[in-house]
Amino acid sequence: MVLPLEMGWRHLLFENWPVDPDVMDAHLPDGLAPDTYDGSAWLSVVPFTNVAVRPKGVPESLGIRLPELNVRTYVVRDGVPSVYFFSLDAQGVASVAGARVFHHLPYFYARISLASDGAGGVRFRSRRLHPGARPARYEATYRPTGEPFRAPDDPLAAFLVERYRFYTEAQDGSMRYTDVDHEPWTLFPAEAEVETNTLVRSHGFAEPDAEPVYHYSPGLDVVTSRSKRL
Protein backbone atom coordinates (compact mmCIF):
# COMPACT_ATOMS: atom_id res chain seq x y z
CA MET A 1 0.00 0.00 0.00
CA VAL A 2 1.38 3.40 -0.97
CA LEU A 3 1.13 5.99 1.80
CA PRO A 4 -0.77 9.28 1.43
CA LEU A 5 1.40 12.23 0.42
CA GLU A 6 2.00 15.71 1.78
CA MET A 7 3.30 18.56 -0.37
CA GLY A 8 3.00 22.23 -1.20
CA TRP A 9 1.73 23.60 -4.51
CA ARG A 10 3.38 26.92 -5.37
CA HIS A 11 3.31 29.62 -8.09
CA LEU A 12 0.31 28.26 -9.98
CA LEU A 13 -1.26 29.60 -13.14
CA PHE A 14 -4.72 28.32 -14.03
CA GLU A 15 -5.20 28.84 -17.77
CA ASN A 16 -8.79 27.92 -18.63
CA TRP A 17 -10.83 27.65 -21.85
CA PRO A 18 -14.54 26.90 -22.37
CA VAL A 19 -15.10 23.77 -24.51
CA ASP A 20 -18.23 22.24 -26.04
CA PRO A 21 -19.43 19.55 -23.58
CA ASP A 22 -19.93 17.02 -26.39
CA VAL A 23 -16.32 17.52 -27.51
CA MET A 24 -15.09 17.02 -23.95
CA ASP A 25 -17.29 13.97 -23.42
CA ALA A 26 -15.63 12.27 -26.41
CA HIS A 27 -12.25 12.62 -24.66
CA LEU A 28 -13.35 11.18 -21.32
CA PRO A 29 -13.36 7.54 -20.20
CA ASP A 30 -16.64 5.76 -19.49
CA GLY A 31 -18.08 6.58 -16.09
CA LEU A 32 -17.11 10.25 -16.06
CA ALA A 33 -19.31 13.06 -17.34
CA PRO A 34 -18.18 16.61 -18.15
CA ASP A 35 -19.05 19.15 -15.48
CA THR A 36 -20.25 22.42 -16.95
CA TYR A 37 -20.36 26.08 -16.01
CA ASP A 38 -22.58 28.44 -17.98
CA GLY A 39 -23.21 25.65 -20.48
CA SER A 40 -19.54 24.89 -21.20
CA ALA A 41 -17.09 22.23 -20.19
CA TRP A 42 -13.64 23.62 -19.38
CA LEU A 43 -10.10 22.62 -20.30
CA SER A 44 -7.18 23.87 -18.20
CA VAL A 45 -3.40 23.97 -18.37
CA VAL A 46 -1.75 24.46 -14.96
CA PRO A 47 1.99 25.15 -14.59
CA PHE A 48 3.40 25.21 -11.05
CA THR A 49 5.94 23.61 -8.76
CA ASN A 50 5.52 21.06 -5.99
CA VAL A 51 7.63 21.60 -2.88
CA ALA A 52 8.42 19.30 0.05
CA VAL A 53 6.80 16.26 -1.58
CA ARG A 54 6.99 13.37 0.90
CA PRO A 55 4.95 10.54 2.44
CA LYS A 56 2.52 11.79 5.08
CA GLY A 57 4.25 12.10 8.43
CA VAL A 58 7.77 12.48 7.03
CA PRO A 59 9.49 15.78 8.00
CA GLU A 60 9.10 18.56 5.46
CA SER A 61 12.88 18.96 5.27
CA LEU A 62 13.12 15.51 3.65
CA GLY A 63 10.69 16.30 0.83
CA ILE A 64 11.63 16.95 -2.78
CA ARG A 65 10.86 19.76 -5.22
CA LEU A 66 9.09 18.79 -8.43
CA PRO A 67 8.13 21.34 -11.14
CA GLU A 68 4.99 20.19 -12.94
CA LEU A 69 2.57 20.98 -15.76
CA ASN A 70 -0.95 19.56 -15.87
CA VAL A 71 -3.66 19.29 -18.51
CA ARG A 72 -7.05 18.74 -16.88
CA THR A 73 -10.80 19.11 -17.12
CA TYR A 74 -13.75 19.05 -14.73
CA VAL A 75 -16.01 16.05 -14.29
CA VAL A 76 -18.81 14.65 -12.16
CA ARG A 77 -19.30 11.12 -10.92
CA ASP A 78 -21.96 10.15 -8.36
CA GLY A 79 -22.69 13.84 -7.87
CA VAL A 80 -19.13 14.66 -6.76
CA PRO A 81 -17.44 17.50 -8.69
CA SER A 82 -13.90 16.38 -9.49
CA VAL A 83 -10.88 16.87 -11.75
CA TYR A 84 -9.78 14.53 -14.53
CA PHE A 85 -6.11 14.65 -15.52
CA PHE A 86 -5.18 14.04 -19.14
CA SER A 87 -1.49 14.35 -18.34
CA LEU A 88 1.00 15.49 -15.73
CA ASP A 89 4.42 16.50 -17.07
CA ALA A 90 7.16 16.70 -14.44
CA GLN A 91 10.88 17.11 -14.01
CA GLY A 92 12.75 14.14 -12.54
CA VAL A 93 12.99 10.65 -14.03
CA ALA A 94 12.75 8.82 -10.70
CA SER A 95 9.79 10.88 -9.52
CA VAL A 96 7.90 10.34 -12.77
CA ALA A 97 8.58 6.59 -12.71
CA GLY A 98 7.46 6.33 -9.09
CA ALA A 99 4.26 8.29 -9.74
CA ARG A 100 3.39 6.08 -12.71
CA VAL A 101 4.13 2.77 -10.98
CA PHE A 102 2.97 3.39 -7.42
CA HIS A 103 0.31 6.09 -7.78
CA HIS A 104 -0.99 5.06 -11.24
CA LEU A 105 -0.82 8.64 -12.52
CA PRO A 106 -0.25 9.57 -16.20
CA TYR A 107 3.03 11.35 -15.55
CA PHE A 108 5.43 12.17 -18.39
CA TYR A 109 9.07 13.11 -18.04
CA ALA A 110 9.79 16.66 -19.15
CA ARG A 111 12.61 19.16 -18.89
CA ILE A 112 11.09 22.02 -16.87
CA SER A 113 12.40 25.33 -15.57
CA LEU A 114 10.55 27.76 -13.32
CA ALA A 115 12.08 31.05 -12.18
CA SER A 116 11.25 34.64 -11.33
CA ASP A 117 11.19 37.01 -14.29
CA GLY A 118 12.51 39.83 -12.07
CA ALA A 119 9.28 41.83 -12.32
CA GLY A 120 6.97 39.94 -9.98
CA GLY A 121 6.16 37.21 -12.47
CA VAL A 122 7.05 33.59 -13.12
CA ARG A 123 8.84 32.34 -16.24
CA PHE A 124 7.91 28.69 -16.94
CA ARG A 125 9.36 26.43 -19.65
CA SER A 126 8.51 22.76 -20.27
CA ARG A 127 9.52 20.32 -23.02
CA ARG A 128 8.20 16.74 -22.87
CA LEU A 129 10.95 14.15 -23.39
CA HIS A 130 9.13 10.99 -22.29
CA PRO A 131 10.00 7.98 -24.51
CA GLY A 132 7.11 7.06 -26.80
CA ALA A 133 4.92 10.00 -25.79
CA ARG A 134 3.62 12.65 -28.15
CA PRO A 135 5.89 15.71 -27.92
CA ALA A 136 4.52 18.74 -26.12
CA ARG A 137 5.94 22.13 -25.21
CA TYR A 138 4.77 25.00 -23.06
CA GLU A 139 6.45 28.36 -22.55
CA ALA A 140 4.83 31.21 -20.65
CA THR A 141 5.48 34.11 -18.33
CA TYR A 142 2.67 34.86 -15.89
CA ARG A 143 1.99 37.15 -12.96
CA PRO A 144 -0.79 38.12 -10.54
CA THR A 145 -2.75 41.31 -11.12
CA GLY A 146 -5.33 43.07 -9.00
CA GLU A 147 -6.37 42.11 -5.51
CA PRO A 148 -6.51 38.62 -3.97
CA PHE A 149 -9.88 36.97 -3.43
CA ARG A 150 -11.22 33.76 -1.96
CA ALA A 151 -12.11 31.30 -4.70
CA PRO A 152 -15.35 30.20 -2.97
CA ASP A 153 -16.60 33.79 -3.29
CA ASP A 154 -16.37 33.76 -7.10
CA PRO A 155 -18.65 31.26 -8.90
CA LEU A 156 -16.38 30.54 -11.89
CA ALA A 157 -13.22 30.39 -9.79
CA ALA A 158 -14.92 28.06 -7.33
CA PHE A 159 -16.00 25.80 -10.20
CA LEU A 160 -12.44 25.64 -11.56
CA VAL A 161 -10.38 25.15 -8.40
CA GLU A 162 -12.51 24.13 -5.42
CA ARG A 163 -12.40 20.39 -6.13
CA TYR A 164 -11.21 17.73 -3.74
CA ARG A 165 -11.08 14.54 -5.80
CA PHE A 166 -9.27 13.73 -9.02
CA TYR A 167 -9.55 10.87 -11.47
CA THR A 168 -6.97 9.36 -13.81
CA GLU A 169 -6.83 6.42 -16.18
CA ALA A 170 -4.04 3.98 -15.25
CA GLN A 171 -1.76 2.26 -17.76
CA ASP A 172 -3.81 -0.94 -17.44
CA GLY A 173 -6.97 0.95 -18.44
CA SER A 174 -8.48 0.98 -14.96
CA MET A 175 -9.93 4.16 -13.47
CA ARG A 176 -8.29 5.47 -10.30
CA TYR A 177 -9.22 8.28 -7.94
CA THR A 178 -7.47 10.22 -5.20
CA ASP A 179 -8.96 12.53 -2.59
CA VAL A 180 -7.23 15.83 -1.81
CA ASP A 181 -7.41 17.86 1.40
CA HIS A 182 -6.44 21.54 1.61
CA GLU A 183 -7.72 24.95 2.66
CA PRO A 184 -9.84 26.95 0.18
CA TRP A 185 -7.84 28.64 -2.55
CA THR A 186 -6.76 32.27 -2.49
CA LEU A 187 -6.49 33.53 -6.08
CA PHE A 188 -5.49 36.64 -7.98
CA PRO A 189 -6.61 37.79 -11.39
CA ALA A 190 -3.66 37.08 -13.67
CA GLU A 191 -2.09 37.89 -16.99
CA ALA A 192 0.12 35.63 -19.07
CA GLU A 193 2.24 35.80 -22.19
CA VAL A 194 2.05 32.27 -23.59
CA GLU A 195 4.72 31.86 -26.26
CA THR A 196 4.25 28.14 -26.98
CA ASN A 197 1.51 25.68 -26.06
CA THR A 198 1.24 22.37 -27.90
CA LEU A 199 -0.19 20.51 -24.91
CA VAL A 200 -3.80 20.91 -26.01
CA ARG A 201 -3.10 19.49 -29.47
CA SER A 202 -1.12 16.60 -27.97
CA HIS A 203 -4.39 15.37 -26.42
CA GLY A 204 -6.39 15.63 -29.63
CA PHE A 205 -8.10 18.97 -28.94
CA ALA A 206 -8.34 21.70 -31.52
CA GLU A 207 -6.70 24.99 -30.64
CA PRO A 208 -9.25 26.86 -28.47
CA ASP A 209 -11.01 29.77 -30.16
CA ALA A 210 -11.94 31.58 -26.95
CA GLU A 211 -9.62 33.78 -24.95
CA PRO A 212 -8.44 31.97 -21.81
CA VAL A 213 -9.46 32.93 -18.29
CA TYR A 214 -6.39 33.29 -16.07
CA HIS A 215 -6.04 32.92 -12.32
CA TYR A 216 -2.85 32.91 -10.24
CA SER A 217 -2.22 31.50 -6.78
CA PRO A 218 0.91 31.72 -4.65
CA GLY A 219 -0.08 28.27 -3.43
CA LEU A 220 -1.18 26.17 -0.50
CA ASP A 221 -0.31 22.94 1.32
CA VAL A 222 -1.98 19.66 0.39
CA VAL A 223 -2.51 16.13 1.69
CA THR A 224 -3.54 13.47 -0.84
CA SER A 225 -4.96 10.03 -0.12
CA ARG A 226 -3.49 6.92 -1.66
CA SER A 227 -4.68 6.10 -5.17
CA LYS A 228 -7.75 3.87 -5.18
CA ARG A 229 -9.15 1.70 -7.93
CA LEU A 230 -12.67 2.68 -8.97
Image (cartoon, grey):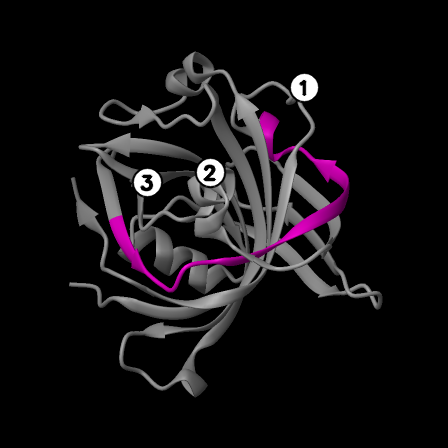
- First along the sequence among labels 1 and 3: 3
* Closer mark to the observer between disc 1 and disc 2: 1
Which amino acid does the dot numbered 1 rest on? Asp
Residue 13 image offset from top left, x and y in percent:
61, 51
Q: Are marks 3 and 2 in contact (CB under 8 Å)?
A: no
Quarter of the view holding residue 116: bottom right
Q: Report the side of 126 relative to 69 (left or right).
A: right
Q: Residue furthest right?
A: 119
The residue located at (66%, 47%) in the rendering is 127
The residue where tag 1 is placed is 209
- SS type, badge 2: strand
The answer to whether residue 206 is above or below residue 78 is: above
Asked if residue 34 is positioned above or below residue 181 in the image, the reply reads: above
Check residue 112 for magenta coloring: no
Where does label 3 land, which residue?
82
- For disc 2, the marked residue is 72
Three-letter code for the amino acid on which mark 2 is drawn:
Arg
**Distance of mark 1 from mark 3, alpha carbons?**
25 Å
Q: Which residues are magenta?
A: 178-201
Dominant SS type (magenta):
strand
Q: Is residue 68 left or right of residue 177?
A: right
